[in-house]
Image: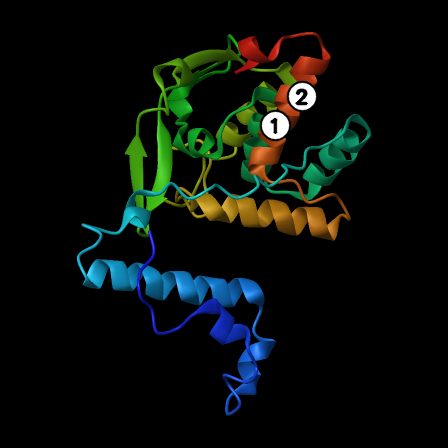
Amino acid sequence: GHFKCSLQPAQILNPDHHSQRREILYLPFQFIVFIYDFFTLQNLLYTNQLAGNPCKYANLPKGTPKEIRILYRDEIQDFLNALADASLDDKVAYELALFMGLRRSEILGLKEADVDIVNCVLYVHNTRHSVDGKFVDSNTKTKRSTRMLAIPEFVALDIARLIESRKNFKYEKVEYLIQDGFGNAPHPETISTRLKRLEKEKGLPLVSMHGLRHTYASLLNASGIDMARIS
């Protein structure tokens, strides 16, 4: 229905009505409509013509999902060549994402005891996040995320080298597979930041840890495995 309002759209857009404040004419029309609607709603609430603000329960539309950049086949070898200059911890972390599809939190949650080098098997059942600046260990995202995976032979060799390199480690030993070089589990953003730095230094496309995981899924799909099974 209609209601009384001292400010009408025709008055807003009429230059004669605002001879003293002509600058309002330069406002975008959408903004003028928004202001009008806002005061209309406030008036309805103030006069008890509305029991409450209906906008409170509106579901805002989600923004357009950002496209995830993956590595294409001809870029993967360049990426592997660049890993030669990364620390062994970083190299293994990126290989676990690219060739096994592990999430960043799953990689950081891995412990040396979760890796069976002899049988080339890895057990994923723990994740590690940073919440309010503190590390939090938890179970995997879903029950299906708790899984046993076969490790590619060349990745298993790098993991074995990584574990072997810590035998005479001067720092206090921690149980996590991926460390920061000082015997500590790295912050989740640290390996992502170092990945981005490596890619910039080597002139590679900027692919995130999540992008490496999507690359793995794309490779599986290209080999004939359907997406339902991959997920």
Residue holding disc 1:
214
* Percent of width and height locating residue 75: 78, 33
Q: Which residue is mark 2?
A: 218
Q: Residue at x 73, y 36 (%)?
A: 79
Instruction: Tell me: 2 left or right of 204.
Output: left
Residue 132 x, y percent position in the rendering: 30, 51
Does residue 103 appear to the left or right of 217 in the view shown? left
Q: Is residue 53 above or below residue 57?
A: below
The disc label shown at residue 115, or none: none
Does residue 82 sit above or below 53 in this rendering?
above
**Residue 193 visible (yes or no):** yes
Callout 1: helix, strand or loop?
A: helix
Instruction: Give amino acid for label 1.
Output: His
Callout 1–callout 2 Cβ contact below 8 Å: yes
- In the image, residue 30 above or below residue 10: above
Q: Secondary structure at mark 2?
A: helix
For this view, does 90 lie left or right of residue 222?
left
Q: Kindly identify the residue that appears in the image at 50 percent across and 12 percent down.
A: 149
Tag 2: amino acid: Ser
C-alpha distance separating marks 1 and 2: 6 Å
| Residue nearer the viewer, 3 or 184 | 3
Query: x, y (%) of residue 216?
Result: 63, 23
